[in-house]
Image (cartoon, rainbow, N blue to C red):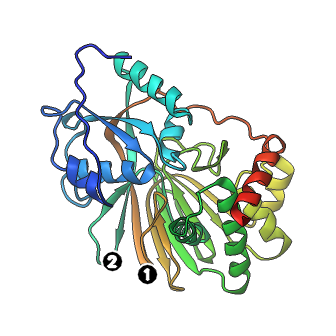
Amino acid sequence: MALPGVRLEARFTQYSGHAEEIVRGMTRGEVGIILVAGGDGTVNEVFNGLLGAADGGYPAHHELPAVAILPTGSANVFARALGYPADHLAAANMVVDLIGGELRRTISLGTWKGDNDPARWFAVNAGFGIDADVIARVERARSRGFAASPMLYLQVSVRAWMRAQVKPPQISFRAVDTAGEVIEAEEIPLMLASNTNPWTFLGPLPVVTNPRNSFDVGLGLFGLRSVRGAGGVLAMMHLVGIGHGRRLERILRRRTILFDDAESVELTCDSGDRFQVDGEFEGSPDRVLLTSIPEVVEVFAPRTNPSPPTMNWARHLLHYARDVVRVRA
């Protein structure tokens, strides 16, 4: 379906970081819309290219091209949290409708800065600990030819949890929300900061840790105080979206940390564990500062966050069993 008055110019990326180079310095006077065909990593590159260093001055959102997404990655967390469907054809049809109807919204983004690095932007999530370990090991599996299937993530997550029984990460944090409330904790094995809701997907299933989180507020924090024993298993299940009933949440309250609308977060990790941003492994820094910046970029999307569908694990057991066979084959 064509859009009257819209001319499309395609530019292909050739290597990691190329999308950032392509869009760097673009203004709305030159390019009205950037249609990103890719996954969360490509979206991350586009935002960093458009906005530049996050600790310097950056253009106002009305000076930058508006961004639309054609989700073609393995997870597409950012696009799906905005309300884009997982199916490529359905997403393409939605892009046409959104652009034709001028359906735009301005959203917040997060920034992260290590001790010796310039500050950069993130759209989805960032964190130390088990999630970063999972991402690094999934990248290794993909380099060996495995597909990034939900079952691969589940299997790698179980192994990461087992390793954490022996040597759990040691993460400390201090966070301040937009009202000035402060929360802090020391020596916890997992701390995740998300800019989206859901914060990730297991195949068709959304994973929601902070139900009140959205692109219109600050960062949502989810942490685990312990991953050991039976309670640790329950806490990990809670992380991936199983067991959000009131009774189980009361049991897990002492193990989990929930904090919404965080404006700034300081994370330190003395155990040398991995750090990830938007699903990409970013090394093992000792200290990272995260901030939430409101109304940074304009995107084509429904004007409100979609309500995550209710998860039905039983419905997808056959698909997970199929993925187990494929991963082990």
Whether residue 245 appears in this view of the structure is no
Q: Could you tell me how far apart the alpha carbons at marks 2 and 1 are, in whole angstroms? A: 8 Å
Could you say where residue 206 lies in the image, as x and y percent from the top left? 65, 44
Nearer-N-terminus badge (2/1): 2
> Which quadrant would residue 253 be assigned to in this image?
bottom right
- Quadrant position of residue 183: bottom right
Residue at point 59%, 81% (across, down):
170
Residue 39 horizontal/vertical position (percent): 45, 48
Which three-letter amino acid code belongs to the residue tagged 2?
Asp
Closest to the observer: 247 or 157?
157
Q: Which mark is residue 115?
A: 2
- Vertical placement of residue 100 versus 141, above or below: above
Q: Which mark is residue 286?
A: 1
Please report contact status of discs 2 and 1: CB closer than 8 Å, yes or no.
yes
* Residue 164 visible in the snapshot: yes
**Measured from the top left, where is residue 74 in percent x and y?**
53, 50
Quadrant location of residue 145?
Answer: bottom right
Q: Which mark is residue 104?
A: none
Residue at the extreme left of the image, as rendered: 29
State the quadrant of the C terminus: bottom right
Between residues 11 and 43, which one lies in front from this camera angle?
11
Query: Where is the N terminus found, in terms of image quarters?
Result: top left
The residue under the point 84% across, 44% down is 314
